[in-house]
Image (tube, helix red, strand yellow):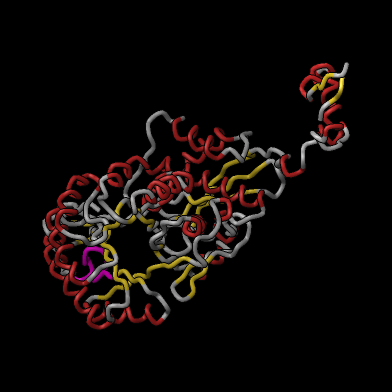
Amino acid sequence: MEVKKNHKIVGRREVLKGLGFGSAVGALGIFGGLPDASAKEMKETPSYAKGMEPITIKSVKAITTRPSGSNLIVVKVETSEPGLYGYGCATFTQRAFAVLPAIEYLNEFCEGKDVDNIEDMWQSAYVSSYWRNGPVLNNALSGLDQALWDIKGKRANMPVYQLLGGKCRFAIPCYAHANGKTPEEVAVDVQKFMDQGYKYVRIQQGGYGGAGITGTPDFKKAGFAKETDGYMDQRVYLQSVPKMFEVVRKVCGAEVELLHDIHERVRPIDAINLIKNVEQFDPFFIEDPFSPENMEWFKQLRATTSVPIAMGELFNNVNEFKNPMVNHWFDYIRIHVSQIGGLTPAMKVARLGEFYGIDTAWHGPGDVSPVGHAAQAHMDYAIWNFGIQEAAQFSDQLREVFPGCPTMNNGYMSVNEAPGFGVEVNEKVAAKYPMTTKSSWTIRKADGTIIKP
């Protein structure tokens, strides 16, 4: 717009300058620069930008139970909002009672804090003990972390996977566990799972390390160690695995994906040779060839075979994944999620894996609570570089204690789509199954030497 002044043409800028700033704002309405709006409308915050009222943590407590043979610990976080709470898995089966005092520390530490600040809560709790966490403190922290994600989902009225980016897949492919005393028995077990729709099956003969197919060891005859200690003949195991793969492939065909877990129970060089021997049978992956103390052996393994490797179940710290990923030492992220501190750090490792072509394969045995399995399932939905999930088998007792468990159908896991993780805890029923201090995770050679898992 131009205005004639003393027979001169004056531009908009000069007009605004003459009017002054306050008048200029009003004048802009004339020029069409701003829509008409009352002062009240200009001051009000739109409803979508207001957010939700702050809610604080009221208490952090542990719920313990053992309905199906494994000690399970779940953390319950209660809030200042009546009826709003969350659950998280803090299960460290082998040393369950040691986790409980750590959860008591978190109760005092978290009281009065904002439930929405999950990252700040995780970081502050992690470093507040000064020394970096081990499995006891990490499991307690996992319970808190997952419970806060459960609460955030309930606050948003969404399943947690929606908060992580939404679904990348309609359901979650899982692998089942086949076992038997002979290769033929293992093959029959594999066929059973194939009939149920499973396309991925992990095969073990006589359990981990073939402990169930060997006789009475010399150390027991000599009265050395405890009667309940397990025995593994490493040579028998190493000879049995290629035969098992051969029979299962012959009986079950090439369509089924076969997995196997070495469980770090043989010397690194023997693990390398074993993997070379089964390469011809096209394994989906071989799990845990080396213990965390023997990571340097991966260089030789990678130079020797192209069999995919899953690793990380025994890692305590997310930083333990950094160098192996950079060096492409393994192909599947095998995290026990509560072991490293919950959903928050697990997602960070998963996102890092995406940039190195490494997929996820969360650890999902019976010593993960249904709450923990649900947390893993929600991550599985949202992670683009998802690989496979260990199948969860929930007994009737578990379902009674944990209503809302994920479900299995045709080899796929699904969640119930409720806000949060969708799993509840019946504390009265949980109390009927008290935990125990018994632990049977001890395996020896014939002479009594401990075998590291």
- Residue 211, image x and y in percent? 22, 65
What's the residue at 26%, 56% (across, down)? 288
Figure quadrant of residue 435: bottom left
Figure quadrant of residue 183: bottom left
- Residue 447, image x and y in percent? 11, 56
- Residue 219, image x and y in percent? 13, 58
Closest to the observer, 380 or 40: 40
| Residue 139 in view in this figure | no
Figure quadrant of residue 331: bottom left
* Left or right of 232 in this view: 309: right
- Residue 181, image x and y in percent? 23, 75
Indicate whether 281 appears above or below 152.
below
| Residue 327 in view in this figure | yes
Closest to the observer, 51 or 114: 51
What's the residue at 38%, 34% (across, down)? 132
User: Which range of residues does the magenta coloring cover?
Assistant: 203-213
210 inside magenta stretch: yes
In the rendered image, the residue lying farthest to the front is: 7
Quarter of the figure with the N terminus: top right
Closest to the observer, 324 or 75: 324
* Left or right of 418 in this view: 287: left
341 inside magenta stretch: no
What's the residue at 35%, 71% (across, down)? 200
What's the residue at 87%, 33% (across, down)? 40
Q: How many numbered callouts?
A: 0
